[in-house]
Image: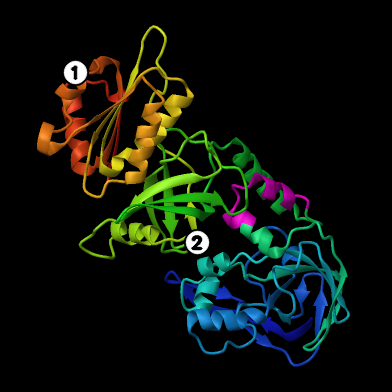
Amino acid sequence: MHILSVNVGNSRAVIIKQQTVQTGLYKLPQSGPVPVNRLGLLNDVRIEPRPWGQEHHAVYAYPHEHYAYWERELGREPFPTGQFGENLTVTGMLEEEVRIGDIFRFGNTILQVAQPRIPCAKLNDRMGMRFSPVFMASRKVGFYLRVLQEGSIAPGDNIELLERDEASPTMEEFVRVTQFESWDALALQHLLQARDLMPAWREIIETKLARTQTARGWHGVREFAVVRREQESEDTVSLYLQCIRGRALAPFHGGQRLTVVLGGHSAHQQRRTYALSGSPQDLTNYRITVRRMVAPDDTLLEGVVSSHLVAMQVGEHILCTAPHGPLMHTLPQTGNERIPVLLSQGLGIAPMLSHLYELEAKQANTAYLFHEPATSEPQGLLREIHTLLGRNAGFQLTQISPDINGQIDVDLIGRYVQLAQADIHIAGPRDFVERLSNDLQQAGIDPTALIAQSFG
């Protein structure tokens, strides 16, 4: 490990959001030793006040190994040292290895790793693009150090590790958990054990931990790996998802959904929601069933996201929000018996399967499923439906063929159950869902007893 460059910045005016502001981000390499005091390098301009204490931002170090990565990713010419606003361009100090609280000797100065760099809008100006989200998502952010022993630092000085607590989190882990995986209570608890953790960061992490521990699912997005893939039809697949960190999955209820996020943590995310088609009693994985949507314009969300998911293979990763969506009654109520009625067309069978699994687990006596086939039926899910119905005598499936016996309508439902007793969930294509929702509301069904979910 050694110092490749020591960089000091003067004040410079830049325009950000049509306003002129000053920045010290544009730093230049120094040829000889630079004195270091408790608050940083001599003559290094700092424009913004540091609410957490200047001593915790005294010196900013950035690994030179990342330069080649960014030059390649951005298609840019070789960057000059100091490009990222760092005081020290260093080698051999990667975020996957450097830990919070590490103590190093830089020349005759002793510095301690305090915290990661959280980028601001001024870095965007320096890079000539909206770079900060990409920079943060890469976790190649470098780190700030506090000064334990004043001295001087020069280019070419060796860097020596003096003390390290191996139980303290690495910079990569710290950024990943605090910025992207704050749903992970165990990981947050580990961060709180960091050596010499700043009081401000302790407060932030404790707040995130408290929120996570009281959440029904999780906040933000969580990364999953595809562990199994089943082809349901030519254009439809079921994907089985497991948390890449091996953490337990949040419970869900029949009919609930996951929102899939493409584009990572960038500013160009695309989101689409898919029904959970697995059993709420099996939390070893989540299963979603996805059909490739045909869109007139391939740039439309329906086409982009579903095409990506249908093509995914085992081992690939996606981001998802927590299970969400309205709940219907899942058990008859003593003295006021409610009957679950499930109405689906085509891929609308997916959330109905999760409903039936939940009803079975709660030993419901009766459930009615009305299904209209569509082109490209999810055959695996339908076989699963028949198996489940075969072991539950009170669950009844009525399949409707438009060519033979018309369509699902209010009159058909009324032959099996009184609408006043029914809790109804409709799922399928938009026109199917809108037609039945309107007809049922005109028939006087209580709006609180109706859940509608359309696909496409």
Which three-letter amino acid code belongs to the residue tagged 1? Arg
Task: Give the camera-side residue of 26 and 375.
Answer: 375
Q: Which residue is mark 2?
A: 316
Per the image, is 189 magenta?
Answer: yes
Q: Identify the image's colour scheme: rainbow, by chain, secondary structure or one colour.
A: rainbow
Task: Give the camera-side residue of 302 and 173.
Answer: 302
Give x and y (percent) for residue 271.
39, 54
Q: Which residue is mark 1?
A: 415
Q: In the rendered view, tell whether residue 450 sits above or below residue 456.
A: above
Per the image, is 344 magenta?
Answer: no
Q: Residue at x 69, y 88 (%)?
A: 29
Rendering quarter of residue 327:
top left
Task: Give the camera-side residue of 317 and 53.
Answer: 317
Give x and y (percent) for residue 193.
78, 51
Magenta residues (range): 177-193
Give x and y (percent) for residue 247.
62, 46
